[in-house]
Amino acid sequence: MIIILFGPPGSGKGTQAVRLSQSLGIPHISTGDLFRFNVRNRTPLGLEVKKFIDNGMLVPDSLVLDMLFDRLKEGDCQHGFLLDGVPRTIAQAKQLDRFLETKEGFRLVLFQLLLSDESIVQRITGRRTCQTCGSIYHIETTPPKQAGICDRCHGLLIQRTDDSAEVVRERLRAYHAETKPVEEFYLQKGILHPIIGSKSPDEVFEAMKGLVA
Ligand code: AMP
């Protein structure tokens, strides 16, 4: 199975991607996570993309696609995968479509998480992410048992540099300008399942699981 998760920043894509990939046994491919790994390790790619990420801007398509297709060629992706945060532009969607045409016998499921801009800002500015395992918390709605420490692996919880109120506004602008048209494209094709993203993580997960069963 190949799953693609769409939705604005902070709509719960990361949280649901982890749960779905575990329950279906397919790798979770997040271009945001791959970029952050490169930034943390100061690779040439990381140094090149840092300024885009820190300012809430989209990374140029060619860098996204090279990195994505390199990852999708790895062995663990040959029996399916889940994409989180990609495609984000029409150009990325077209390249991905071409790549998917070469894959036979896969079921393709696309989800669109829906959430208002107001809820997004509230969610993202309270979000804390584990530096070690990537688990996601919210200081008000889903706090860790011990402040600043991950329940799962005891790693340090940090606020992503691009989760500040100012950068979130730019990320939302990029989402509405660049990514919304991609969602509209798949919606018109009739292959995108809209999911209400304001429900609890458990409810959202159940709704998605029902559609991939
Ligand atoms: P995310 O973790 O998905 O919210 O991504 C964090 C940041 O990484 C985004 O704000 C972009 O700067 C960059 N990024 C991640 N995926 C993409 C993509 N598919 N296209 C362009 N930029 C991306």
Image (cartoon, rainbow, N blue to C red):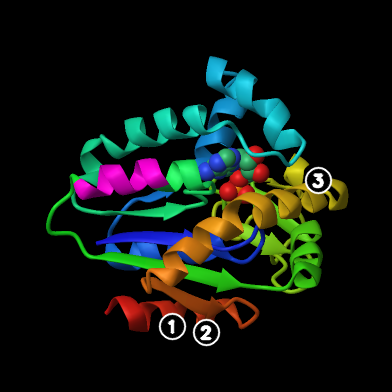
Residue 112 showing in the rendered view: yes
Q: For mark 3, what is the residue?
A: 167
| Of 147 and 49, the residue lying toward us | 49
Asked if marks 1 and 2 touch (Cβ < 8 Å), the reply is yes
Which mark is on residue 203?
Answer: 2
Give the vertical position of 139 relative to 28 (above or below): below
Whichever of callouts 1 and 3 sits on the residue coming sooner in the sequence is 3
**Residue placed farthest to the right in the image?**
166
Q: Does the magenta portion include 28?
A: no
- Disc 2 Cβ-to-ligand 1 distance below 8 Å: no
Would you identify the image quadrant in which residue 1 lies? bottom left
Q: Quadrant of the C terminus?
A: bottom left
- Amino acid carrying label 2: it is Glu
Nearest to viewer (mark 2 / mark 3)? 3
Question: Which residues are the magenta region?
Answer: 94-101
Q: Which residue is mark 1?
A: 206
* Residue 154, percent from left and from top: 61, 51
